Image (spheres, rainbow, N blue to C red):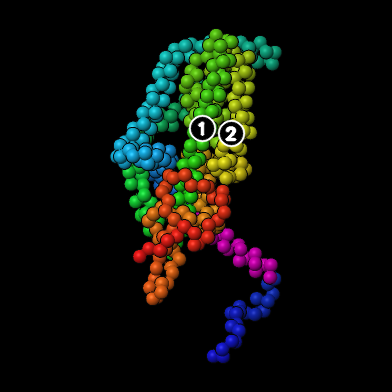
Amino acid sequence: MAWGRKQQQPRHPDPVVEESVPTGMRIAGAWSWRILVVIGVIAVFIWLMTIFSQILIPFLVGIVVSALLVPISNWMQRHHVPKWLAVVISLLGGLAAIGALVWLVVDQIIASYPSLRDRTVDQYANIKDLVLNSGLGITQGDVNGWLDDGTKWLQDNSASILSGVASAGSGATHVFEALFIILFTTIFLLIDGKNVWRWAVRLFPKKARATVDGAGVAGWITLTSFIRVQIFVAFVDAVGIGLGAFIVGLFFGGMPLVIPIAAFVFLGAFIPVVGAIVTGFLAVFVALIFNGPLAVVLVLAVVLLVQQIEGHILQPLVMGNAVKVHPLAVVLGVTAASGLAGIAGAFFAVPLIATVNTMVMTIASGRWRGLDSEHVLEATPKRGQHGQLQLRRGRRHKVGDAVPAPGSKPEPTAAEGTASTN
C-alpha cells in the first residue's frame, strides 16, 4: 500500500447509471430517505403513545403537577424545612387547593340549579315567541317539526346512548386508575425525583449521558417556568371574565354562577389560544338565560377584551420571557395535537413544544456543559499525566434552582464550570 495515496471513493456498480443522475437529484434523494426515516420514527412514537394513552396521559399530568410542586418543596428545603415535611406540605397543599375549588364549584351549581332550570324554561318560551314573531316566515309547525326531528334522533340513537351509560362504570374505573397514577407519580417525583431522573439518563449510552442530563435540566427549568406563568395567565383570565360578568350582572339584577364560570375559565385557559374563549361562552350562556340579549353583548365584549389583553400583553411580555416559542408554532401545535389526542393533546401541546425546543437548543448551543444534576459524568474523557482515564463532572446544579434560560447569557466553554474527579 502506497502511503499518501488518495483513497478512492466507492462507485456505483453501474457507472453509467451513477453519472446519469444529476447532482441535485442525488442530494434530494439523500435528504428524502432521511426525512422519511424521521417521519417513520415519529409515526411509530405517536402510535405507541395512542396504545399506552391510558397510562401515558396520567403520567404526563403527574409530571406537570410535579413541575408546580417540586420547586415549592425545594424552596422549603432550602429554608431548613425537613424534606419529608416539605413534601407533605406541598402535596397536601395542592390537594387542599383542588378540593376547595371543586367543593366551591359544586356548591354554587347545586344552589343555583333550581333557578337555572326555571329561567331556562322561561327563556326557551321567550326565544320561541321571538322567532315566531320575527317576520322570517317561521311557523309553530316548523318549530314542532324541529322538535320532532330532535326527538326522533334521540330515539334512533337511544341504543348508543344507553350503551354509553352502561359503560359509565368502566369509565369511572379508568378515572380512578388515572387519579391513582397521577397521585403516585407526583409523590415519587417529590420524594425521589432525582433518582428517577438518574435511572432515565442511564438508559442512554455513556457518552451521551452528560448531554441528555444537561438538556433534561434545561427542559425541566422551562417546564416549571411555563407552569408558573400559565397559572398566572389563567388566573388573570378567570378573574377578568368572572369579575366582568359580575359587574354586568349588577345592572341586570345579578349574575349567578360567577364562581363556577371563573373556575371553568381558569381550567380552560391551560389550553392556549382557544381555551379561555370556549369556557368564557359559559358566561355568555348564563347571561342569555338570566339577563337577556343586551347582557349577552356586554359579557361577550368582556370575554373578547380579556382575550385581547392576554394575547397582546400577557403572552408577549410574560409568557414570551418564559417560553421561547413563536405564537405560530403554538397555534399549529395546539391544532395538530388536538386533532391527534383531543383535549389531552391540546393541553400538553405547548409545554411539550416548549420543553423539546429548549432541550434541542441546549444541545445545539453546547450549554449542556454548564448544566449538571449532580450525578452524570461529562461525556468527554481526559487522559491524565500517566495515561489513566479521568472523567470530568459538570458544574453542580440542582433541579428546581433558578438557572438562566438558554440564550440569556454567553455560552460556557468546555473548561468552565468543570472540575476533575478522582
Label 2 vs 1, first from the N-terminus: 1
Q: Position of residue 391 (x, y in %)?
A: 40, 65
Residue depicted at 33% across the width and 38% down the height: 81
Q: Position of residue 229 (x, y in %)?
A: 51, 36
Mark 2 and 1 residues: CB-CB less than 8 Å, in contact?
yes
Amino acid type of the residue tagged 2 in the rendering: Leu
Question: Badge 1: how crowded within 10 Å, few (<14), some, or many (20+)?
Answer: some
Residue hosting label 1: 232
- The quadrant in which residue 18 appears is bottom right
Amino acid type of the residue tagged 1 in the rendering: Phe
Q: Rounded to the nearest whole Å, what is the CA distance between mark 2 and mark 1?
A: 9 Å
The quadrant the C terminus occupies is bottom left
- The quadrant in which residue 273 appears is top right
Q: Nearer the viewer, residue 96 or 137?
A: 96
Vertical placement of 100 versus 343: above or below? above
Q: Nearer the viewer, residue 241 or 20?
A: 241
Residue at the bottom extreme of this rendering: 2
Q: Nearer the viewer, residue 379 or 391?
A: 391
Residue depicted at 44% across the width and 32% down the height: 160
The quadrant the N terminus occupies is bottom right
Secondary structure of the residue carrying tag 1 is helix
Vertical placement of 129 versus 166: above or below? above
Is 298 colored magenta in this rendering? no
Residue depicted at 55% across the width and 18% down the height: 245
Residue depicted at 45% across the width and 60% down the height: 418
Viewer can see residue 98: yes
Is 41 colored magenta in this rendering? yes
Residue hosting label 2: 314
**Numbered range of the magenta stretch:** 23-42
Q: Position of residue 272 (x, y in %)?
A: 55, 36
